[in-house]
Amino acid sequence: MLKAVLLDLDNTLILFDELTYYKAYFKKLHTFFKGEFTMEELQERLVSGTMELRRNNGSRSNRQHFMETFTRGMDVDLSGLWDRFMAFYREAYDDMGVTVSRPAGLHAGLERLRRSGLKLVIASNPIFPVIAQEKRARWGNLDPGWFILFTHMENMRYVKPMPEYFLQACELIGEEPETCLMVGNDPVNDMSAAQAGLKTYRTTDAEVIDYASLTLTDEQRKGSPQHIPEPDYQGPFAGVADIVEQLTVKNQ
């Protein structure tokens, strides 16, 4: 029986050009780290630290794993550098000039899901801290209080497309994977939920899919899972609530 719906955020609940977003992100963030890194050095450390999260074995949070990689070879105070990240998210993250839109029927669909009584999760790839995840949700006029859980780098030990990410998310909300539906636009990062036993719905509202949020080298792509099954369902976000109702009735 369906108990929970896990919802990707970027280009699922909010639609935007991720390449434009990351260009603005690096530029704005660099103003908080000018004393330590050139723009090129900062971008290289950010990308390496983010991609290295795929190697997290679950023994520590993504935040801890990221910061160790980000500062590799440096003799620095980790808490001081983390404070700079937090200052950036508080002071500059909402001012990047990125145009965000919403898929048709977003709020009506979410309201139907909320009335269903199912647990709702923002299952965004946990490569950002919670402050960033919640701010991006608000870009789509989404109330964080609608969701039982946001996955972020401070509460997760794995990242998409690792099956362990989905298993941990299910564990955090107290539900078995077989009772959960993963909704997202990415055929790799989101649909890999099938490998953990979740049902899957691939949304088609986003015109451009950035498969890994950041540009990957050939070496980094080797860590991506192979043979991901086709989604159980596919269509615009507006169709998710219909599928949820079908699954709910079917299992009554």
Image (tube, rainbow, N blue to C red):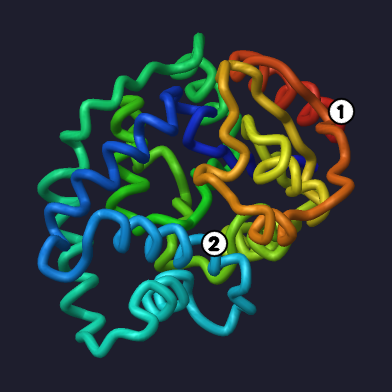
Q: Is 250 drawn above or below residue 54 in the view shown? A: above
For the residue pair 46 and 129, the one nearer the viewer reads as 46
Q: Is residue 121 visible?
A: no
Circle number at residue 250? 1
Instruction: Give the amino acid at mark 2.
Output: Met
Instruction: Give the amino acid at mark 1.
Output: Lys
Residue 84 place in picture, x, y as percent? 16, 65
For the residue pair 227 and 124, the one nearer the viewer reads as 227
**Residue at the spot 76% in from the left edge and 30% down from the top edge:** 248
Q: CA distance from mark 1 to mark 2?
A: 40 Å
Residue 4 place in picture, x, y as percent? 64, 44
Q: Secondary structure at mark 1?
A: helix
**Residue at the spot 20% in from the left edge and 85% down from the top edge:** 77
Q: Is residue 252 left or right of residue 164?
A: right
Q: Is 23 drawn above or below residue 103 in the view shown? A: below
Tag in front: 1 or 2: 2
User: Does the residue at mark 1 contact the one at mark 2 (Cβ under 8 Å)?
Assistant: no
| Classed neighbour count for the residue bearing mark 1: other residues with Cα under 10 Å, few (<14), some (14–19), many (≥20) | few
**Residue at the spot 62% in from the left edge and 34% down from the top edge:** 184
Q: Quadrant of the N terminus?
A: top right
Q: Secondary structure at mark 2?
A: helix
Q: Quadrant of the C terminus?
A: top right
For the residue pair 106 and 131, the one nearer the viewer reads as 131
For the residue pair 113 and 7, the one nearer the viewer reads as 7
Q: Is residue 41 left or right of residue 179?
A: left
Residue with the mark numbered 2: 51
Q: Is residue 25 left or right of residue 187?
A: left
Q: Earlier in the sequence, mark 1 or mark 2?
A: 2
Residue 197 place in picture, x, y as percent? 82, 52
Q: Quadrant of residue 21?
A: top left
**Residue at the spot 43% in from the left edge and 76% down from the top edge:** 69
Residue 51 place in picture, x, y as percent? 54, 61
